[in-house]
Image (cartoon, rainbow, N blue to C red):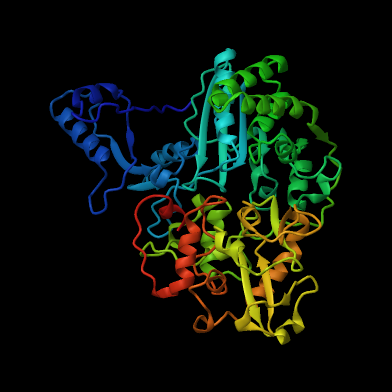
Amino acid sequence: GEKVGVVKVHLYRPFPVEAFAAALPATVKSIAVLDRTKEPGSIGEPLYLDVRTAIGEAMADGKTSFACYPVIIGGRYGLGSKEFTPAMAKAVFDNLKEAKPKKNFVVGINEDVTGCSLDYDPSFRNAMAGTYEAMFYGLGSDGTVGANKNTIKIIGETTDNYAQAYFVYDSKKAGTITTSHLRFGKQAINAPYLIDHADFIACHNFTFLEKYDMLSKAKPGGTFLLCSPFEHDQVWDRMPVEVQQQIIDKKLKFYVINAIKLAEELGLGARINVIMQTAFFTISNIIPLEQAIAEIKDAIKKSYGKAGDKVVSMNNAAVDEALKNIHEVAVPAAASSSITMPPSVARHAPKFVQEVTGKIIAGFGDDLPVSAMPIDGTFPTATSQYEKRNIAVDIPVWDESICIQCGICSFVCPHATIRMKAYDEKLLANAPKTFKSTDCKLPEFKGMKYTLQVAPEDCTGCGACVHNCPAKSKEDANHKAINMQFQPPLRAEEAVNYDFFLSLPDMDPAKLKLDTLRGSQLARPIFEYSGACAGCGETPYLKLLSQLFGDRAMIANATGCTSIYG
């Protein structure tokens, strides 16, 4: 019921002075001009200056419907891709009502250095009756974004619903979180901002439960769909206690499906998109299930038809199998898990990494105040070692009895997560119980011990090491010196083993035959745990350069993948 309004300037140049003045009512008392740009050193942003000038000229020419010059203040919004939500818009109007409104303000950023930001209530939302809001958290390259683009097309084209979709992901091509925001309903959707209060939330990667606070965005009584590597009668005890409590407190309906297992059995690899899409339509009942299945299969034909009939039939089979493997989990009355959400970065990480980088990784980067940012904008390097992404479903496990110590697995590893060392046997005195070692077969290190160790929390599970391993068991040709195994039960003990491995002295480069493959792999890489895609073919070369030349290497970089993973 408040007397407020909005004027949108669509034609900016040439600025329409008369049309702008005519759009302002005679009752106007105060105006806030929002610019989506910052002009350091100027007395105001472009639109703000134009509005002041336009109103001044119009009043001088007698072309305004108001006699008194209104209060005009300028502000900035949406900088750095920040959201502009109804709560922020309300904060602008609230500021205008003040006797002395804040000038040259910014909204959406916590500007605690100059104190020019407006406070707002993030819980304030526009009521959108009849609009269904869904969020999907996926892993880059698992097909989640593509499937949701098909989903919004199906709903928009086969029903009388209005539809809207936003997709959020970073520059990494694979292996990082993607978020899909879908809205649909009978009324026009006027919501140019991301969802923060969803009817439906889907988590397509089980490890996200330990890293992201996804269910804080769930509406009470909403639905939660989880892609779980554990069976429906085991999954509850495998979840962090914080997630369990949110499900209980918000009275969420909880469904699980082992999409990873189904995709592997059907030959789809890590592409779980069609399976999860089918689960969404089955649970949400947005459109009749038979119609949804027909539309999904039609979209499969359009999307994968060029790949051949075999690929189409595999994806159609994924739809059919998904229908049989969706399970609702009975939610207990109390949280019982012994698992807690770990910090987003390692506890021993430097202060800046914990307080800034860690919050960005956890998805709270927009909440950071300006004072948290480095004055010169430079971020410290060598921080990927603290991230511990835990995105691998399977990791390589070493069989020391078969290994020929060739170093090929370490050589081809894109992320430097398989390391090898030769060391004095005395150093094993304090080794963890499950730490593996064997006699070193390299002539120059005769009498020493040798270990090949994987970093379980940094490995992406690409399998390049296993694929290239030449050593096979004489009894079983499928069993090699390294073999992929399910990561979750191995993670804790192998993380301890890896920490111990890193504590062993690094090899002296002067004593290594760096002109040989295995000699080079005994040198510690200083290009490690990059953000490259699983199985990347570029990063092993950069890693090798770091082993051969260390900090003496000068690498000139051009725009491309290297700008992202490096």
Residue 60 appears left or right of 496 = left
Q: Nearer the viewer, residue 230 or 298?
A: 298
> Taking 218 as reference, is 311 above or below it?
above
In percent of the image, x 75 and y 64: which residue is there?
399
Q: Position of residue 489 (x, y in %)?
A: 78, 57
In percent of the image, x 20 and y 30: which residue is there?
13
| Residue closest to the far bottom | 426
In percent of the image, x 64 and y 78: which residue is there?
422
> Taking 430 as reference, is 311 above or below it?
above
Q: Position of residue 93 (x, y in %)?
A: 42, 36
Q: How many marks?
A: 0
Q: Position of residue 214 (x, y in %)?
A: 65, 44
Q: Nearer the viewer, residue 143 or 135?
A: 143
> Taking 166 as reference, is 408 above or below it?
below
Residue 458 appears left or right of 403 = left
Q: Position of residue 509 (x, y in %)?
A: 51, 80
| Residue closest to the far front | 474
Q: Nearer the viewer, residue 267 or 210?
A: 267
Residue 254 appears left or right of 66 = right
**Is residue 221 among the parts visible in the rendering?**
no
**Is residue 242 among the parts visible in the rendering?**
yes
What is the quadrant of the C terminus in the image?
Answer: bottom left
Q: Dividing the picture into quarters, in which one does residue 324 lie?
A: top right
Q: Nearer the viewer, residue 505 or 112?
A: 505
Residue 409 appears left or right of 13 = right
